[in-house]
Image (cartoon, coloured by chain):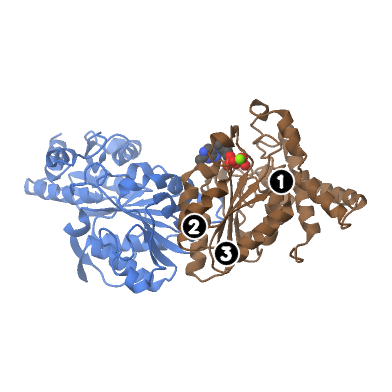
């Protein structure tokens, strides 16, 4: 275990994400936010954000990677500004739907809706890094559903040819909206495909953030050494509907969801920390209180901030 | 001032800009070692190395997607799509990613990308080596679409395109590559994107064209001049955004308009140009607007008769112009 990993920071990011996720959903149900993308069950991805170098690496995450973004420094204020599509939303000034992140100051390239269009961009950033002889690593995430599209094939192929420092991270939650894995692919593991491109393919249990971290660290070290890309498949389960516009009762049983919830990444990490005497119930209660306060403050801040005017829709089409 | 072919002008411009700016690199199928199937990138691999003249797999989506990523972090990629007919797998990347990058990030990111691609017919290319694709892409604000017709313009526009902070689709009519020669001023000069050019002054009719059809139109104008009809020929040069001012100024002068393009007629560039004129200069018109275009067919036939039947040429244009003059 890398001792430089701050376990408390990891847990804090995951717990904050869970509490945020609940709030975002509530606000949508109250009619205060047009769109929410639940991430509960995916919080283990925070592990990879801790393995990257925040000062130089790039992150082009899956849209369900709120936990990784929170670990990467995305704040509740910023999240609520996006949720409410406010003018000061850093990602898009309220132009894009929620969860389409863009953090120019933190090397998160603007993400679109068509999946997984950003994966080729990750390869392009890594290529630029190679041409300029920068020692950067580019992380890119996508769902197993999106891995069916040709972008992934072309990206993995090119990255492997040029030994580019890209980590392809497939979050396999077994569903593309309603379509189950067995209707998406004939293989058990998406990572099996990695061999066909000449790169390692690794499967990791996303319920355990520390395993995600370890696996990410190895892949990142390999990439930084110049040994090329790695494909990581994180097995997760999405506890909530696909988005606020989905009703998951149409395609999966409550029993299945309840069973999956027994492997809750936030709970599993908390229990592990407690078992190792690194945490206790009192500290947890105090932390939850702090995080709720932070969330309340971020929400209030965003609610009070200005919305775009009609004129704001007409700027930044071209540079001049 | 040197005399160069259209192709040489494009090649030399890339060479000079790569020498001047180390952020510029080319990528695409066969653009490295062999210098491109049309030889547009010949010599770049030898001069700048494999890192800056990158032979890619046959995979257009990722040629553009990778270029977008590199552009976003400060490189100046020039992506070549070997034939415009094969650009469609990258349509999503161009329209949904490159063209929207600035807008959707509220200028947090930009996409200084040039996509060069040979297009157009008249070289026995059949259905899939002859297409005109501009209309698909002229419907995508955020993107520039440029189509030069002379070696001089090719240089000035390509330099502008490479230095432009927004994405540019740079359409090179493949029939012009070796058939058109012209004077190209030495040294650096740019021609601003979004500006049309009056290639021939005249007072009787305005003929609006671009690319290979510009030359057919100039030929037609020559014929009509011998008959005493003076045709003003406007070269659009940038197809999106259009230079409304130059179009309207000419139309107000001549009062008669013919729009010429090789692309198929319906929903083609001519439709938009005609709409601009009827919205802005209806009262100045003395005749209905004419269009001389490719017919609404799925493609250009390989056989010579079919290809000829498809393509507008100086004769067909001259006939339309004469009718317009008589109206
Ligand atoms: C190209 C494209 N097709 C369809 C959609 C609509 N869509 C959005 S998310 C999604 C499912 C994606 O599933 P997956 O990649 O497994 O990610 P998950 O939502 O499960 O995390 C679909 C079909 C899209 N965004 N892009
Ligand atoms: Mg999925």
User: Can see residue A214?
Assistant: yes
From the viewer's perspective, is B66 left or right of B233? right
- Residue at 27%, 58% in the rendered image: B37
Q: Secondary structure at mark 2?
A: loop
Q: Is mark 1 within 8 Å of ligand 1?
A: no
Q: Secondary structure at mark 1?
A: helix
Query: Which of pointers 3 and 1 indicates the residue nearer the eye?
Result: 3
Ligand 2 positioned in quadrant = top right
Marks 2 & 1, CB-CB < 8 Å contact: no
Real-space CA distance between mark 2 and mark 1, rounded to the nearest whole angstrom: 42 Å
Give the labeled residue for mark 1. Answer: A80
What number is the disc on residue A198? 2
Q: Earlier in the sequence, mark 2 or mark 3?
A: 2
How would you rate the neighbour count of disc 2 (Cα within 10 Å): few for under 14, some for 14-19, many for 20 or more?
Answer: some
Residue A7's spot in the image, x, y percent? 79, 58
What number is the disc on residue A283? none
The chain drawn in brown is A
Q: Earlier in the sequence, mark 2 or mark 1?
A: 1
Label 3 and label 1 in one chain: yes
The extreme top residue here reads A250
Residue A166, by quadrant, is bottom right
Give the labeled residue for mark 3. Answer: A223
């Amino acid at each position: 275990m890398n001792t430089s990993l701050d376990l408390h920071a990891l847990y804090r990011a995951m717990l904050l994400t869970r509490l945020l996720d609940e709030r975002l959903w509530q606000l949508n149900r109250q009619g205060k936010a047009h769109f929410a993308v639940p991430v509960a069950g995916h919080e283990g991805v925070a592990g990879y954000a801790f393995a990257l170098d925040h000062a130089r690496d790039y992150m082009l995450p899956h849209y369900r990677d709120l936990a990784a973004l929170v670990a990467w420094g995305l704040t509740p204020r910023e999240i609520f500004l996006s949720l409410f599509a406010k003018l000061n939303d850093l990602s898009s000034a309220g132009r894009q739907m929620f969860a389409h992140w863009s953090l120019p100051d933190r090397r998160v390239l603007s993400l679109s809706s068509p999946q997984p269009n950003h994966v080729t961009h990750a390869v392009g950033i890594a290529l630029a890094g190679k041409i300029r002889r920068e020692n950067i690593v580019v992380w890119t995430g996508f769902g197993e559903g999106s891995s069916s599209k040709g972008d992934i094939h072309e990206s993995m192929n090119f990255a492997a040819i040029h030994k580019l420092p890209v980590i392809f991270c497939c979050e396999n939650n077994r569903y593309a909206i309603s379509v189950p894995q067995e209707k998406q692919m004939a293989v058990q593991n998406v990572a099996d495909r990695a061999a066909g491109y000449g790169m390692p393919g690794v499967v990791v249990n996303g319920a355990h953030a520390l395993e995600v971290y370890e696996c990410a660290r190895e892949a990142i070290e390999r990439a930084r050494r110049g040994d090329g890309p790695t494909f990581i498949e994180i097995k997760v389960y999405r506890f909530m509907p696909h988005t606020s516009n989905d009703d998951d009762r149409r395609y999966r049983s409550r029993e299945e969801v309840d069973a999956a919830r027994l492997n809750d990444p936030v709970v599993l990490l908390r229990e592990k920390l407690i078992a190792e005497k690194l945490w206790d119930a009192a500290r947890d209660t105090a932390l939850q209180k702090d995080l709720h306060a932070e969330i309340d403050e971020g929400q209030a801040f965003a609610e009070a901030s200005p919305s775009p005017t009609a004129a704001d829709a007409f700027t930044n089409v071209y540079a001049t | 001032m040197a005399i160069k072919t259209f192709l040489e002008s494009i090649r030399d411009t890339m060479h000079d800009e790569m020498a001047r700016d180390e952020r510029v690199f080319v990528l695409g199928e066969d653009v490295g070692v062999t210098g491109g199937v049309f030889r547009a990138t010949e010599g770049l691999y030898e001069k700048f190395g494999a890192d800056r003249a990158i032979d890619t797999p046959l995979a257009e989506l990722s040629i553009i997607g990778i270029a977008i990523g590199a552009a976003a972090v400060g490189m100046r990629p020039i992506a070549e799509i070997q034939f415009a007919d094969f650009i469609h797998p990258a349509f999503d990347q161009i329209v949904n990613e490159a063209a929207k990058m600035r807008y959707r990030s509220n200028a947090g990111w930009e996409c200084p990308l040039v996509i060069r691609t040979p297009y157009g017919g008249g070289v026995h290319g059949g259905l899939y080596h002859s297409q005109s694709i501009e209309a698909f892409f002229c419907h995508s604000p955020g993107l520039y679409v440029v189509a030069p017709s002379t070696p001089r313009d090719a240089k000035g526009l390509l330099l502008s395109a490479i230095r432009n902070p927004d994405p540019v689709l740079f359409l090179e009519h493949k029939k012009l590559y070796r058939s058109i020669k012209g004077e190209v001023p030495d040294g650096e000069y740019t021609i601003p994107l979004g500006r049309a050019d009056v290639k021939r002054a005249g007072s009787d009719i305005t003929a609006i064209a671009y690319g290979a059809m510009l030359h057919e139109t100039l030929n037609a104008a020559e014929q009509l001049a011998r008959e005493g009809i003076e045709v003003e020929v406007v070269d659009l040069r940038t197809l999106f955004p259009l230079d409304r001012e130059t179009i309207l100024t000419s139309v107000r002068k001549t009062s008669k308009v013919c729009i010429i393009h090789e692309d198929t007629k319906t929903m083609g560039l001519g439709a938009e140009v005609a709409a601009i004129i009827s919205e802005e200069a209806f009262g100045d018109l003395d005749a209905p607007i004419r269009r001389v275009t490719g017919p609404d067919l799925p493609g250009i036939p390989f056989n010579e008769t079919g290809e000829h039947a498809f393509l507008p040429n100086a004769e067909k244009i001259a006939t339309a112009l004469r009718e317009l003059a008589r109206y």
